[in-house]
Every structure is written in C-alpha cells, then in structure tokens.
Image (cartoon, grey):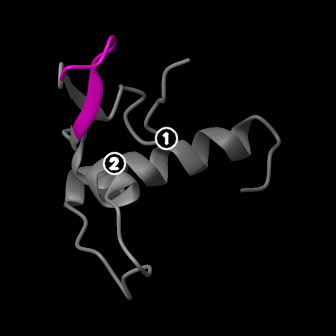
Amino acid sequence: MSTRCPFCGGDPYHYEDIGTAFPEPVAVTCCELGIEWFKPRDEAPGSIPVSWEDFDRIARVFEALRTLGMQP
C-alpha cells in the first residue's frame, strides 16, 4: 500500500533502509502543499504560505469538480 499526496498525486516520502527488512519513510519530500500536509506536528498551523502556481492549480481542480457536477 502506498500513500499518495492529495495535491500532486506522488508518493510524499523519501525512503531509506534503516536496518529493517523494508525501507522506511524518513522525510517528506513532496510538493510544497504535500510537505505541509504530511509534516508531523502537534497541532495544525493557523495558516501556511501557498505559491501562486499552487493556488491557481487548486482553483482549477475546484473548477473541474464543479464542471463534473460536484460541489467541493
């Protein structure tokens, strides 16, 4: 089973062999939004910076969902 980033669709983790039988995730190396999403923390941040390109990409996803009749 692999984890996928909800923003870019890639695997958000960098894996290394740490002496176990299987590579373990050791760092989040995804897109800017994926890093914020998967980063371990005690509580959610109040806000995060988003580049214009990512903001535009998110807007286009919402537009596509509405075109398909969904209400995000």
The x and y percentages for residue 17 are 18, 19
- Res. 23 image quadrant: top left
Tell me how far mark 1 sits from mark 2, CA to CA. 7 Å
The x and y percentages for residue 52 are 22, 60
Q: Amino acid at mark 2?
A: Gly
Q: Is residue 54 magenta?
A: no
Is 65 placed left or right of 62 in the picture? Answer: right
Determine the main secondary structure of the stretch shown in magenta.
loop
For marks 1 and 2 on the same chain, the one whose residue lies earlier in the sequence: 1
- Res. 46 image quadrant: bottom left
Q: Residue at x 39, y 57 (%)?
A: 37
Answer few, some or many: residues within 10 Å of disc 2's Cα (few below 14, many 20 plus, some between 14 and 19).
many
**For this rendering, which residue is in front, 34 or 72?**
34
* Contact check, label 1 and label 2, Cβ < 8 Å: yes
Q: Residue at x 68, y 42 (%)?
A: 65
Q: Helix, strand, or loop for circle 2?
A: helix
Which residue lies under the disc numbered 1?
6
Q: Amino acid at mark 1?
A: Pro
Q: Is residue 23 magenta?
A: yes
Is 33 placed left or right of 62 in the picture? Answer: left
Residue 32 lies, with reference to residue 3, above or below; the image says below
The x and y percentages for residue 68 are 76, 34
Q: Residue at x 71, y 56 (%)?
A: 72
Q: Which residues are magenta?
A: 19-26
The x and y percentages for residue 41 are 35, 71
Which residue lies under the disc numbered 2?
34
